[in-house]
Amino acid sequence: MTLDWASIDSLGLKTKRKPMVFNKEWGTGDVFKWYTQLEGEGPESVLVSRLQIRNTGGKIPHRFVVAFLRGGKVVRFDRRPLTKKPGTLFAETLGAFSSRKAADQYEELEGEKLKEIDNSEREIDLKMPSSTSLLHIISACFSLSQDPQSVHYELLKYNCYFFSWSIVMIVTRHTHAVPRPEPHGMIERFNSKLDCLVEFVMDRILKALLQFVTETVSTFRAETGRKLDKGLGRRELLVWKLPIWAVNWVLGLALQFRFRFGLEETLKRKIKATINTHVRPVLEQVLEMQDTVAEGQIRRRLWINDFSEDFQALVQGSVLKVLWSAVLDTLVEGYNGIDGEQLIEHFKSHPKLRYRLKYRLSGNNVIQFTQIWNDALNAALLAARDRFRELDNMHVIPDIPEQMHEMVFDEVFNAGCSAARSAAEAVVAKTREQINSPTRDQMWQEVWDAWDRVWGLARPKCREVAIGVINEGLKEITEQATLVIMEEYHPHTRKKKIPRKKFGAQVSSYNA
């Protein structure tokens, strides 16, 4: 903002300007009484035909707003400091004191005062739509007066320049159509952000998968105690007896290996395609909604940066409906496609010696466990995805986020738990003859007996993890999609983070 000495220099002039003092409640106070008196003179007496910003000229001009009413009157709106103490105001620019309250003023111009206006420089002159009312200007001034920062006068920031341009921009936004961003450019920019978004989403999904598995293993250990020891091989027992953090580390290595086995790139491609497929129509839908809900919300915002909140709400509401489906589709199509036997065969014929040695040293018990791990997870993910599709096709999924999370998680968790057990039992049955161990069979019976109880105990933590992934993914996708939209309204935000909210005030809900 410019240095506003001109506002101080003119404080001593004798004028008929009246202070624009507002109460906390819209519609009360002297300003609204003045408006009511004008309105009583006829319908056109409060309609604005032209809106100007003028300045007094010179090296440091004083800016003010001039409104030409259709009834013939001309009204001037100014911002000045409450007192004319240049020394104090100069100290404010150096940060020595807090800002002081602004003295916003209005004045009906006539006679010599009206002629003086012609001697000032016209900075902008807008022909306003026929529905533009003086109440639009009052609404903007009221909102500035309610904002905890803009209510104060600051020499370098909230001065006459800020006041004048804020009023004109706010009124214009209320009286003119909100421009719609061009969809193609938005989609292109969103696509350019996908690589980083994919890394973020994939990282959260992998961590969630590992947490699911480790939470279940931890619960199995706690519930079965030493009942499983008799059926475990020496290597398995060694791992099973490790501290839980070490078991988690081993399981993490197994999951990482599974992803190195070609899954990582597959999953990245699938996540990218899924996000693009789901979010693109959401962006287009948000643009369509601007003509109705979104536009109404935008008009109530005081600052352009606050638009992001409205777009975030719209994008978030739409993305949440597809995010569960997107995550489940991604996991199934990324992880599925190789069963346990194929995985073991890959170990046997791996081009690297260390993997072939691992296979030969593993033994039948470890090989069986590896197949169970792989097939059970495959089956669980597939069943969860299919159950979600059934719910979606039946149109029974609630729109309220909390209810959606609760219902979807419980349904897909139950389906996944049941499918995982069936897949695990199938592997045990297929490998029983090769292992040929009665104690191993007894161990698996202990596992089946504890299965439902263990998954029931693990459910709360798994729910927390799953919903956390959905919410984090929702937040990140929403922020990126909102940023893409905001770049159309605010080009300087490109390649930056979403603009943070600067002020809390909103324009009043007045409708012309």
Image: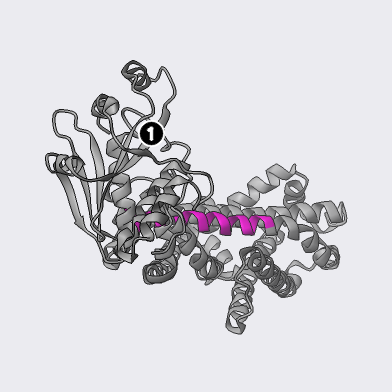
- Going by the image, does 328 lie left or right of 103? right
Looking at the rendered structure, the number of numbered marks drawn on it comes to: 1
Return the residue nearer the eye: 126 or 179. Answer: 126
State how the image is colored.
Answer: one colour
Screen quadrant of the N terminus:
top left
* Residue 486 highlighted magenta (yes or no): yes
- Residue at the disc numbered 1: 103
For the point 33% across and 42% down, the residue is 106
For the point 19% across and 38% down, the residue is 55
Where's residue 287, x and y in %?
Answer: 36, 68
Where's residue 327, x and y in %?
Answer: 53, 65
Q: Kindly tell me whether residue 446 is visible in this rendering.
A: yes
- Magenta highlight range: 464-487
Q: Is residue 22 above or below residue 1?
A: below
Screen quadrant of the C terminus:
bottom left
Return the residue nearer the eye: 340 or 365. Answer: 340
Prevailing SS of the magenta stretch = helix
Return the residue nearer the eye: 384 or 506. Answer: 506
For the point 79% across and 63% down, the residue is 456
Three-letter amino acid code at the position of disc 1: Ala
Where's residue 457, x and y in %?
Answer: 80, 58
Q: Residue furthest bottom?
A: 394
Residue 94 location, quadrant: top left
* Residue 205 highlighted magenta (yes or no): no
